[in-house]
């Protein structure tokens, strides 16, 4: 995918130099996920903090790795690192405090000091974190730590991290040298940094989804790939699964939706578990049926919030729809 993206950028730059509108611009305007990537790069090059909501199965780490590569190669250069908080699942706030301080210390190439990083209280964590942020600003290298999987971290530790960084960003003087991107599937009031832009990592648009499948399967059966996209939508994890597992059986998947679920394997189990949890509520089950039976997006409903958190529904332009038509099978064919 990197080669294709680079080719498009070079083509656009050549078009600008020649005073022409490049045909690839149409692709970029239709590429929803690419727009999020561009906005993220703009904010991080300006050293502006970013809060990003990453729905389930959105392949957030791969997205952030791509953005980090772009920021390292372009100008002004920003050195980035992705940091998954999955290891903090089920850990106590004290364990999360120590783990975070060690990670930030390593990323910024700082010394932890005389054991002071071993926090036993919230006050100690905040004091140590504040000191690390201040020392990171002294380095001439522009850095951004991309922390993702925030849903795995204890909510108290997350609040502490956000509070300290908010104060640091407000009080620092001169040009910023250290920045944070916080990404997670949670969408709650405590997951926010004052004065920052909140981004949502969208699924692939139709053209992007088709490109993803073509990279795996080639262009020999392009019409069938278009039909496949119309069934599975633009969920990145789902497209990856089909791209790796479906060769030789595209026609079967298109003709029989049950074959699609067999191909998805473990991903299918995750989606079925998510559905089972929300379907235990009759109101949520009825809403899923409404969305599955609709041939268009529907007006927002209070029940949509729970379905979005489950990863089954997306909101766009004040409307709600299933993230992929095949998800409707869960409600209609159970």
Image (tube, rainbow, N blue to C red):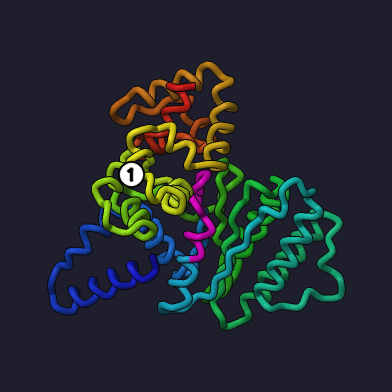
**Residue placed under numbered mark 1 in the picture:** 229
Q: Is residue 157 left or right of residue 165?
A: right
Residue at x 35% of width, y 35% of height: 318
Residue nearest the viewer, comparing 189 with 84: 84
Residue 169 in the image, given as x and y percentages of width and height: 58, 64
User: In which quadrant of the rendered view does residue 176 lie?
Assistant: bottom right
Q: Which residues are magenta?
A: 52-65
Residue 2 in the image, given as x and y percentages of width and height: 39, 69
Task: Specify whether residue 285 is in view.
Answer: yes
Residue at x 35% of width, y 51% of height: 209
Task: Specify whether residue 200 is in view.
Answer: no
Q: Is 177 located above or below residue 171 in the figure?
A: below
Q: Is 36 located above or below residue 227 in the figure?
A: below
Residue nearest the viewer, comparing 65 with 328: 328
Kind of element beneath mark 1: helix
Residue 296 in the image, given as x and y percentages of width and height: 29, 29
Residue nearest the viewer, comparing 292 with 243: 243
Q: Is 260 located above or below residue 244 in the figure?
A: above
Residue 230 in the image, given as x and y percentages of width and height: 31, 40
């Amino acid at each position: 995918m990197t080669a294709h993206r680079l080719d498009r950028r070079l083509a656009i730059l050549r078009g600008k130099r020649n005073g022409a509108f490049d045909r690839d611009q149409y692709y970029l305007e239709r590429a929803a996920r690419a727009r999020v990537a561009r906005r993220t790069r703009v904010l991080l090059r300006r050293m502006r903090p970013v809060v990003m909501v990453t729905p389930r199965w959105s392949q957030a780490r791969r997205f952030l790795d791509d953005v980090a590569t772009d920021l390292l190669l372009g100008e002004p250069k920003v050195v980035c690192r992705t940091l998954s908080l999955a290891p903090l699942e089920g850990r106590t706030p004290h364990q999360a405090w120590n783990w975070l301080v060690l990670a930030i210390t390593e990323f910024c190439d700082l010394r932890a000091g005389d054991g002071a990083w071993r926090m036993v209280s919230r006050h100690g964590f905040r004091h140590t974190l504040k000191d690390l942020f201040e020392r990171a600003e002294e380095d001439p290298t522009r850095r951004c730590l991309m922390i993702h999987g925030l849903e795995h971290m204890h909510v108290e530790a997350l609040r502490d991290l956000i509070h300290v960084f908010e104060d640091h960003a407000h009080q620092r003087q001169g040009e910023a040298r250290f920045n944070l991107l916080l990404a997670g599937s949670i969408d709650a009031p405590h997951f926010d940094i004052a004065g920052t832009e909140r981004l949502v990592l969208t699924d692939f648009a139709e053209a992007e989804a088709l490109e993803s499948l073509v990279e795996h399967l080639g262009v020999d059966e392009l019409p069938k790939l278009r039909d496949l996209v119309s069934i599975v939508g633009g969920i990145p994890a789902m497209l990856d699964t089909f791209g790796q597992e479906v060769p030789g059986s595209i026609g079967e998947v298109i003709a029989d939706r049950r074959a699609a679920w067999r191909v998805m394997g473990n991903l299918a189990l995750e989606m079925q578990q998510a559905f089972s949890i929300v379907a235990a509520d009759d109101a949520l089950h009825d809403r899923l049926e409404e969305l599955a039976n609709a041939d268009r997006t529907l007006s927002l409903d209070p029940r949509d919030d729970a379905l979005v958190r489950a990863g089954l529904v997306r909101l766009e332009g004040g409307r709600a729809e299933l993230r992929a038509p095949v998800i409707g099978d869960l409600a209609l064919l159970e």
